[in-house]
Amino acid sequence: MTRTLAIQAGLGIASGTAGLIVLLRPSVARRLLRVEASEPATYALRIGGMMLVALGLFLTGFALAFANAGGVA
């Protein structure tokens, strides 16, 4: 795995972890972002968290698939 793929996988892991925290604990993210506690804010945080999890899956998955396929970046 080249340095570029390792950075891509690291960013994927970081965004996936942040997304899981926002998705599973929206109250913690709401406090950190200083957002008012409301139903729309909770839904927005959950949607944003799921987007970050999906980004992490795609970045990490593609980096690992490319490295396992023997690709050279």
Image (cartoon, rainbow, N blue to C red):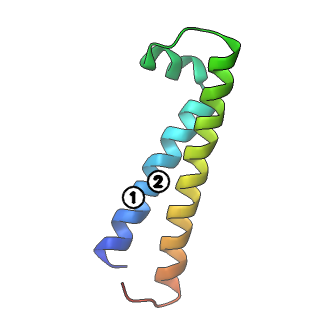
Residue 40 locus on image (x, y percent): 68, 18
Residue 31's place in the image compared with 19, above or below, is: above
**Residue 22's x, y, as percent?**
56, 31
**What is the secondary structure assignment of the residue under circle 2?**
helix
Relative side of 47 to 31, left or right: right
> Measured from the top left, where is residue 30 in percent x and y?
52, 17
Q: Which residue is mark 1?
A: 10
In what quadrant of the picture does the N terminus appear?
bottom left
Q: For the residue labelled by badge 1, is the local secondary structure a helix, a strand or a loop?
A: helix
Q: Residue at x 47, y 56 (%)?
A: 12
2 in relation to 61, above or below = below
Q: Where on the picture, by quarter, is residue 6?
A: bottom left
The amino acid sitting under disc 2 is Ile
The label number, if any, that marks residue 31 in the structure image: none
Type of the residue with mark 1: Gly
Q: Which residue is mark 2?
A: 13
